Image: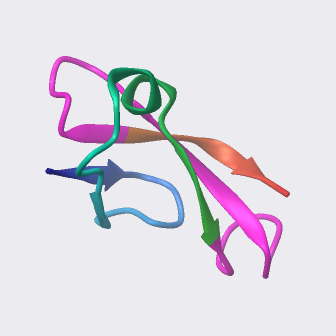
């Protein structure tokens, strides 16, 4: 199963969430990226949003 990231530095990424349990899917993901607000080693946070579980919305960047 894949989810589609929307907005933020990783807009359009297809993320493989195969095997993730319901709690992990509800929490979303903090994905390493060099192109976010924190530069190399930073993370872009994505969370499930709206009515489509295959679409995860950007929730901000973090260190």
Q: Is residue 58 left or right of residue 15?
A: right
Quick check: is 54 in the magenta stretch?
yes
User: Toward the viewer: 47 or 2?
Assistant: 2
Residue 28 image point, x, y percent: 47, 36
Disc count in the image? 0
Query: Residue at position x 34%, y 40% from top?
Result: 20
For the C terminus, the image quarter is bottom right
Query: Residue at position x 37%, y 31% from top?
Result: 25
Residue 41 image point, x, y percent: 79, 75
Question: Which colour scheme appears in the figure?
Answer: rainbow
Query: Residue at position x 63%, y 74% from top?
Result: 33
Magenta residues span 33-56
Residue 12 image point, x, y percent: 29, 65
Quick check: is 36 in the magenta stretch?
yes
User: Toward the viewer: 25 or 35?
Assistant: 25
Measured along the vertical axis of the image, is residue 5 above or below residue 49? below
Residue 17 image point, x, y percent: 29, 51
The quadrant holding residue 55 is: top left
Measured along the vertical axis of the image, is residue 30 above or below residue 23? below
């Amino acid at each position: 199963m894949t989810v589609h990231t929307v907005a933020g530095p990783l807009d359009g990424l297809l993320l493989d969430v195969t095997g993730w349990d319901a709690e992990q899917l509800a929490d979303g993901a903090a994905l390493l990226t060099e192109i976010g607000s924190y530069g190399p080693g930073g993370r872009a946070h994505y969370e499930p949003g709206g009515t489509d579980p295959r679409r995860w919305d950007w929730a901000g960047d973090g260190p």
